[in-house]
Amino acid sequence: MITVRYFAAAAEAAGTATEQLDAGTAGELRAALADRHGAELERVLGRCALLHDGRRLDDPGSPLAAGGVVDVLPPFAGG
């Protein structure tokens, strides 16, 4: 199980601030999130950074450790 924490527009699009789900890679996670929450979150995910236990997930094949935390961070404006 992976804990997913949403911030700002991602939380609004998902309709929740946190949830748990199973995914083995970053690509599987993105697909599962879009499938679970629909087109609006999928659109927002396209602009978001995913951080797994503080490390950015740029490669869809990046493995996710069970029990880990993934933060979904949309771009932020301002300082």
Image (cartoon, grey):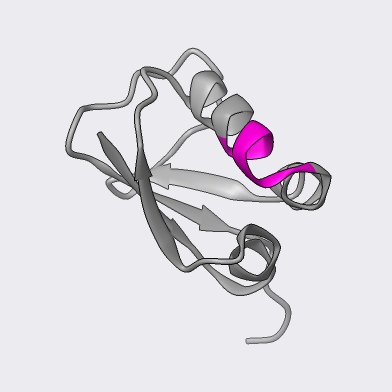
User: Which residue lies at the image location 43% right of the left edge and 46% below the top edge?
Assistant: 51
36 with respect to 6 (left or right): right
Q: Is residue 6 above or below residue 69?
A: below
* Stretch in magenta: 33-38
Residue 34: in magenta span = yes
Residue 10: in magenta span = no
Residue 16 appears at what percent x and percent y?
51, 66
User: Which residue lies at the image location 20% right of the left edge and 29% below the top edge?
Assistant: 66
57 with respect to 39 (left or right): left
Residue 9 appears at what percent x and percent y?
69, 69
Magenta span: predominant SS is helix
User: Which residue lies at the image location 73% right of the left edge and 79% below the top edge?
Assistant: 77
Tally of numbered discs? 0
Q: Is residue 74 above or below residue 39?
A: below
Is the C terminus in the top left, top right, bottom left or bottom right quadrant?
Answer: bottom right
Residue 27 appears at what percent x and percent y?
56, 21
Is the N terminus in the top left, top right, bottom left or bottom right quadrant?
Answer: top left
Residue 72 appears at what percent x and percent y?
52, 54
- Please identify the residue farthest to the left as the structure is shown: 67
- State which quadrant residue 5 falls in: bottom left
Q: Is residue 27 above or below residue 29?
A: above
User: Which residue lies at the image location 32% right of the left edge and 50% below the top edge?
Assistant: 54
- Please identify the residue farthest to the top as the structure is shown: 61
